[in-house]
Image (spheres, grey):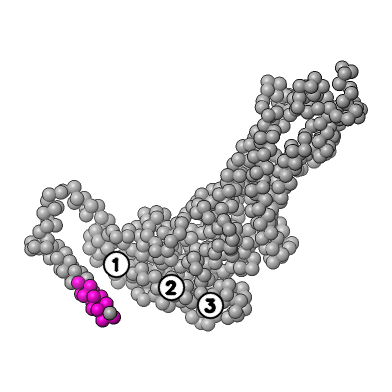
Amino acid sequence: MARMKFICDAERCIECNGCATACKNEHEVPWGVNRRRLITVNDGKPGERSMSVACMHCSDAPCMAVCPVDCFYKTEEGVVLHDKDLCIGCGYCFYACPFGAPQFPQAGAFGLRGKMDKCTFCAGGPEENHSKAEFTKYGRNRIAEGKLPACAEMCSTKALLAGDGAVIESIYKTRVQRRGKGDEIWGWAMAYKRGDALASGVKS
Amino acid sequence: MKTSWWRSRQTSWRLLAGLVVSSGLSLGVSAQTAAPAAAAPAAATKAAAPEAAPAATTAPAPPAGSTAQPGWNVPPKWSDVELKPQYASVPGREMNVLLEDKGQWWRTVRNGPVTFYGGILMLVVPALLLAFFAVKGPFKLHSAPSGRLIERFNSAERMVHWTMALSFVALAVSGLILLFGKYLLLPVFGASVFAWTAQVMKAVHNFIGPLFIFSLAAFFFLYVRDNFFKSHDFIWLSKFGGLLSDKEIPSGRFNGGEKVWFWLSIVVLGIVISASGLILLFPNWDSTRELMAEANLVHGVIAILFMAASLAHIYMGTIGTQGAYQGMREGYVDETWAKEHHEMWYNDVRAGKAVQKPVGAAQPAAGDD
């Protein structure tokens, strides 16, 4: 089974925000919730690069580890999903996530957090595939339709790659060989190769 | 209108294109030959201001075999930039930070030592208290109750104490469920029932929290008067209140142990737990994730210490000391109780120097001493 991952190729990203827009449109994400966002480093200086950031569907996901109601689960393809019916809006996943992926719509006064919302890798949620409930809570389930995430499909420069980790990694490595720079896949060390060093001796 | 708008757009595009081409050319020319018009001003400023030059030389060098131009278009070292605020068009706190690495540390500490040792403490303290009760039993009165009552706590004092006590228990139970429920209740309740429980507990924690803070402040002002340390309190503390000698050391209205409980728990732990709790209670304050994670750790550790200390207090105030619970519930204690547990206070009351007065049958007795 393929292990789904994201790569954003900073040598190609032109900060057009097409991925973020595609995501918002595809899933009809509420105002103020940003499942994917663009960050430009060294803005206006030599070495300026842009990076599209969303949930990286970590191997050892911190959000899963800290959730007090255990509402997260992982699909066979390594996609980290959550059950909004169980989520209590405590915000712990937001503290733990290195990528700032979990988002909270405001549910009341004083910034009270509602049910967490985040990138689903376009894989929906625990509800029945393509059901209305699934769409309302998690957005479209493109994976069940045999499609890839909308953000990567929409990317005009093919900077954002989504799919089987082995496949997109080989595409990226071919690019690096041709251009001779930008060999680091940003975020992968944190998301997939953190290893047991940090969690050694500590259970989840 | 439409055509003129389009034309102006076109002109500006053409201008922009011209600029790009010309600047590109001039860059290329200056790099190649460093001679003609466009490059001359640049060369002149360079010569005039040599301190401007290092900016170009400090630009990162491309790796070996790279086709990148030196100083330009070299990808950043991600570890140098990922933790610092950059630019993001999406508004919001920390939306422009690529990576927040403190969350992982928070996770390991919270899920590790705080949960593990906190859980052990929450089991060990009640076990020790029950063991103490089994061995020593409650502190009983040595003489028979006199039947004469002294007012120990007035209605305001009792109301504030019980508001604080009940809100503390509500916060303790809901907090324990949020920290340990995943391990203890989730396997029993199942996902949906436990999630519903946790949702209610979160609401309880959020709404009772401010009530606890208000009662804490009111409690401080009502009780601080009799909680200042006097020299005899140190004697009391140095002898553990007479616990070892079975002869209770005389004390004022509150003994040394109660004063330590007041200052260390109600004041110090109370302030820390309130401050950290408020940071967590108001997401609209836009705290950073790091601050909220730290506040969460502080809140958890202090809460566990507070609960451990309060268990000892609850023990002493209920099954541990005969007649103590009655004092806080009804507001009155027997004269014998006052004499045996708070001798100096008893003497003050008898002498009319204390705020608290004897009541009922004790009142005419004011003349018989």
Which of the two marks, 3 or 1, is nearer to us in this view? 3
Q: Nearer the viewer, mark 2 or mark 3?
A: 2
- B7 within the magenta span: yes
Where is residue A116, by image quadrant? bottom right
Residue B350 appears in the figure: yes
Q: Are marks 2 and 1 in contact (CB under 8 Å)?
A: no
Q: Within 10 Å of the Cα at label 2, are there few (<14), some (14-19), or many (20+) other Cα atoms? A: some
Q: Dot 1 lies on which element?
A: loop
Q: Amino acid at mark 3?
A: Arg
Chain under callout 3: A
Q: Position of residue A14 (x, y in %)?
A: 33, 69
Label 3: state its secondary structure: loop
Nearest to the observer: residue B197 or residue B117: B197
Residue B30 in the image, given as x and y percentages of width and height: 13, 62
Q: Is residue B120 visible?
A: no
Question: Which is the main secondary structure of the residues drawn in magenta?
Answer: helix
* Position in image of residue A123 (x %, y %): 54, 75
Q: Are marks 3 and 1 in contact (CB under 8 Å)?
A: no
The mark found on residue B354 in the picture is: none
Residue at 74% across / 29% down in the picture? B254
Residue to which mark 3 is pinned: A140
Disc 2 marks which residue?
A21
Q: In the image, which residues are magenta?
A: B2-15
Horizontally, residue A155 falls left or right of residue B32, namely right
Q: Is residue B246 above or below residue B161?
A: above
> Which residue does the numbered mark 1 point to in the structure image?
A180
